[in-house]
Amino acid sequence: MTQGGFAERLAGAVEAKRSQVVVGLDPDPAQLLPGAVERAGEGSPAERAARAVAAHCGALVEALAPTCVAVKLQVACFERLGAPGWDALAATADAARAAGLLVIADAKRGDVPHTAAAYAQGLLGATPTPWGPVEGLGADAVTVNPLLGLDALEPFVDAARAAGAGVFVLVRTSNPGAVAVQDEPADTPLRLRLAALVNELGGTGPGLSDVGAVVAATAPELIAELRAAMPRATFLLPGVGAQGGSVDLLSAAFAPGSSGALVTASRSIVSAALEAGDPRAAATAAEELRATTWNLR
Amino acid sequence: MTQGGFAERLAGAVEAKRSQVVVGLDPDPAQLLPGAVERAGEGSPAERAARAVAAHCGALVEALAPTCVAVKLQVACFERLGAPGWDALAATADAARAAGLLVIADAKRGDVPHTAAAYAQGLLGATPTPWGPVEGLGADAVTVNPLLGLDALEPFVDAARAAGAGVFVLVRTSNPGAVAVQDEPADTPLRLRLAALVNELGGTGPGLSDVGAVVAATAPELIAELRAAMPRATFLLPGVGAQGGSVDLLSAAFAPGSSGALVTASRSIVSAALEAGDPRAAATAAEELRATTWNLR
């Protein structure tokens, strides 16, 4: 299983082309090839920009296919154009495949396991629906962010193996800020170094800042420590309900006042509506959580 | 500046509704409200699923608006439906705003500063194009991943402040795997713990695995150490060229063989085409990098 398709396909492509070069495409609509700008056509700014971006990437793919082994598509640069941008991303991936290039989706996704599986469906697999499967981007490999740990990486690895694809995990990134987080040994937990970043970004002043923090409701024993480290941050507390967190243990999060923390619940609210077949049933579940949380202050 | 609009708007909304509850919407096309399924209409599976997802989310937004202060949209669950999914995401954000809910885009994005700015354009700002600005999602807040450090967070914070929006930085996530990465103190750099994750995911066996690693070409002094920690991982090496990395220093990455590492370059290749106004000029730049890299083995 670990000798899966990707490593072999990559080795074959590298040898065939005698190339280990990956061209990164991070198209900027303001800096496109002249021939691509001419192909913008009509429509909204997003539609015209996305069409021009696809033409720009297509021309580069064609020119670079003999020299490069893969194309790395910077997903940010497509998704900022909304739905037309996702069409341009898919068109560029198709063009690269047709030209014999491997496609690396530089998406740097990472989330809790349930959500990581959804990202993997979109990039590497397919999404089952009552109307048939929705095929994803079909990337040969995807970049992923390991901050959330092993269980959050596994859905990407599983989906990649099922598709004969690969993953590239961020281990040491190339930006100057990487040093402080990724290189410096520390006898404090990473969460406290991240909390210090949040506090620094939030600046000083009275009241709450515009830089908040996601802090798990499933680890309530950490809340007081993190509140002390980030006195001005609004906490977004996931994990209540379906993930097992209890609201009663979260009161330290609300120390700065009523908007000092937000409790976020997904399945525990929405499942009530699904079970009843009626969206109004969700409101009942949400109202219970609202009252419990409001009375914590 | 740190008393920007978001904290005040949030405080006002929390007090007005006496609610700190955020409902998370992570729609699964296979589990939608019956009334939403009926509104799938015609078209491709993606189009039908996205229309049903938007209807499902719209019904929940309407039912939950009086009780919740914000909606947290799980971007993964929309983007796995491709372009129609992004339209559904935008429609849900619009419906939430219209219903008086704040919109938190749960995107967990994070990338090097240049790319982080592109993500921020798509979620919080707008993208300039020759055809006019492309407005982004217009979220009131976005979740971001801090693994890349301070300089990679700043573009999100800057864009949020410019828009009167906020960011929520992942500090302690709610999944079980968070403990090993975020909680355990360690006297080794984080990059080595991440390398151990990569090695574990890759499994044992001969040859290269399908779990690779992104390792900065801008920190060549780390390559040998990381190669020893991940003997079976293909390295994806960004940062050559425009970011200042030199190919000559990367030979340790290729120890497992010719497909043991890939060198990825974006601006240094594409800018040649932009300067010449001809995609073929990119091939010349790529060929130089190809030959230099191939001869490193």
Image: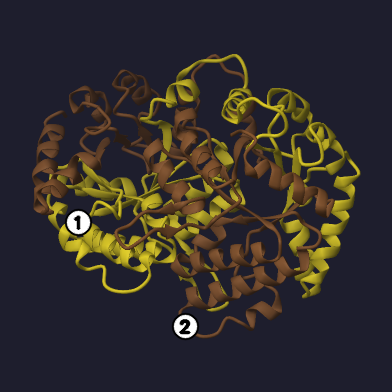
Chain colours: A brown, B yellow
- Residue A217 relative to residue A181: left or right: left
**Side of B182 where B292 appears, left or right:** right
Q: How many marks?
A: 2
Left-right relation of A258 to B164: left
Q: CA distance from mark 1 to mark 2?
A: 30 Å
Q: Name the residue at 51% across, 50% down.
A: A124
Chain on which label 1 sits: B
Q: Write down the residue under mark 2.
A: A43
Disc 1 marks a residue whose amino acid type is: Val
The local crowd at label 1, few if under 14, some if 14 to 19, many if 20 or more residues have their Cα within 10 Å, is many
- Looking at the image, which residue is at 24% across and 25% down? A250
Q: Residue at x 47, y 83 (%)?
A: A43
Disc 2, SS:
loop
The residue positioned farthest toward the right in the image shown? B295
Between residue A120 and residue B293, name the one nearer to us: A120
Is B184 in front, or is B114?
Answer: B184
x, y percentage for residue B288?
88, 55
Q: Which residue is mark 1?
A: B61
Q: Which quarter of the rendering shows the N terminus of chain A?
A: top right
Tell me which amino acid carries mark 2: Gly
- The image position of residue A118, as x and y in percent, is 41, 47
Name the element at disc 1.
helix
